[in-house]
């Protein structure tokens, strides 16, 4: 006859004749009762499994759920987070490689093998570089950490997993010359021209330029406020990359004139549109009033570079790299550029050190007796 399980556990035989070892855990965060059970063929085997359950509970404060899969863990992890295209891609890789595995039986070796397969492109149809491998590991670690918090696993094997070496080399960023940048601006106008100006001349990140609103501009004063960024699916959020990412920067007459001209063209497009425009007042929008997407911007850059003979083509982010490089070559200090670009001085000093023109005042020290 079945007995009410306590934290000391119990052994009983169910209606199908199976022997069950059961132990009751402390109530979960939601206040619900939690139990763990193990099936056995004989009563003595069930008693041995009950001893294992007690030992695991005494050592870790919980008992892992033997039947819970990584896919279920990912679903639980996602339920408590806002949707993110980046998370969808990273967690999709984990789901493809480990989704059917039991979380309790997941080992460090399993995580090592999964990350190695990711590096070879087994789950994403292309090899993955070291930066994205690290992010995949971070997401897997976060999923298992959440499982520990909920009491489904007792250890996080992903934390000590080894990141494999990747054959994918980081693409070296290319900075356009001033002449190349002017050639691009001469053959384009409208929203894409505004984006190229904001990134290539004023140092905005592509996500910041796409998130710019007319209310962020004070064209009479010649300044703009950077306060938001746009994600892959055109959702705007606050900038959060660096403590000085939110900033107010001065724009010159060329940028101001381009923005004013686009404002007039945009009003005409809105008037001529046969369908109502969205309420969001973004600067860089297409003919239907929707914000310019990440892929649209990248495709436009490839097309324009081919049109003016810039080979290889540059990416939208390399336009920001171009703007920062020109500031460094003009003699601006690393802290001035860092505040202007909304990043850290350490990054400017390390990445653009060869472009920073500095004249050292150091002289040979006097010989000390």
Image (tube, rainbow, N blue to C red):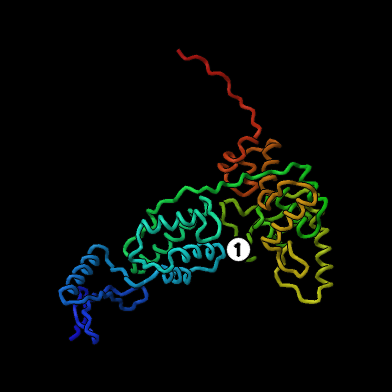
Q: Position of residue 260 (x, y in %)?
A: 81, 58
- Asked if residue 60 can be seen in this view, the reply is yes
Residue situated in front as seen by the camera: 150 or 344:
150
Residue at 33%, 61% (x, y): give it: 155
Residue 106 sits in which quadrant?
bottom left
Q: Is residue 119 left or right of residue 69?
A: right
Residue 73 sits in which quadrant?
bottom left
Residue situated in front as seen by the camera: 8 or 365:
8
Residue situated in front as seen by the camera: 143 or 335:
143
Q: Position of residue 209 (x, y in %)?
A: 69, 57
- Asked if residue 149 can be seen in this view, the reply is no
In the rendered image, the vertical position of residue 225 relative to residue 366, given as above or below:
below
Q: Which quarter shows the N terminus?
A: bottom left
Q: Position of residue 40 (x, y in %)?
A: 22, 75
**Residue holding disc 1:** 237
Q: Position of residue 44 (x, y in %)?
A: 15, 74
Residue at 34%, 77% (x, y): give it: 31
In the rendered image, the vertical position of residue 289 relative to residue 222, given as above or below:
below
In the rendered image, the vertical position of residue 104 relative to residue 367, given as above or below:
below
Element marked by disc 1: strand
- Mark 1 residue crowding within 10 angstroms, few (<14) / some (14–19) / many (20+): few
Q: Which quarter shows the C terminus?
A: top left
Residue 127 sits in which quadrant?
bottom right
């Amino acid at each position: 006859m079945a007995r009410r399980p306590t934290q000391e556990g119990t052994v009983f035989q169910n209606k199908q004749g199976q022997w069950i070892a059961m132990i009751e855990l402390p109530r979960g965060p939601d206040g619900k009762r939690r139990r763990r059970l193990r099936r056995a063929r004989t009563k003595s085997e069930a008693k041995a499994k009950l001893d294992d359950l007690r030992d695991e509970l005494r050592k870790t404060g919980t008992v892992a759920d033997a039947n819970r899969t990584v896919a279920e863990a990912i679903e639980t992890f996602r339920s408590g987070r806002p949707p993110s295209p980046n998370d969808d891609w990273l967690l999709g890789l984990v789901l493809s490689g480990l989704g059917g595995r039991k979380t309790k039986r997941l080992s460090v070796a399993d995580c090592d093998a999964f990350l190695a397969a990711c590096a070879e492109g087994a789950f994403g149809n292309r090899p993955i570089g070291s930066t994205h491998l690290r992010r995949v590991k971070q997401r897997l670690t976060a999923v298992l950490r959440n499982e520990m918090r909920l009491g489904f696993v007792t250890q996080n094997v992903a934390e000590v997993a080894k990141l494999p070496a990747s054959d994918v080399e980081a693409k070296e960023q290319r900075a356009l010359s001033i002449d190349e940048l002017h050639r691009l601006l001469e053959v384009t106008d409208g929203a894409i021209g505004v984006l190229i100006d904001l990134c290539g001349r004023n140092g905005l990140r592509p996500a910041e330029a796409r998130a710019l609103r007319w209310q962020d501009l004070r064209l009479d004063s010649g300044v703009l406020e950077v306060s938001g960024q746009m994600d892959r699916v055109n959702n705007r959020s606050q900038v959060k990359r660096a403590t000085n990412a939110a900033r107010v920067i001065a724009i010159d007459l060329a940028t101001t004139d381009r923005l004013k001209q686009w404002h007039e063209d945009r009003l005409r497009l809105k008037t001529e549109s046969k369908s109502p425009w969205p309420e969001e007042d973004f600067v860089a929008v297409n003919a239907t009033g929707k914000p310019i997407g990440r892929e649209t911007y990248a495709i436009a850059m490839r097309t324009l570079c081919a049109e003016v003979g810039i080979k290889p083509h540059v990416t939208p982010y390399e336009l920001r790299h171009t703007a920062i490089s020109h500031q460094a070559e003009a003699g601006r200090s690393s802290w001035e550029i860092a505040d202007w670009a909304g990043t850290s001085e350490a990054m400017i000093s390390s990445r653009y050190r060869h472009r920073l023109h500095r004249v050292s005042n150091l002289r040979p020290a006097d010989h000390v007796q």
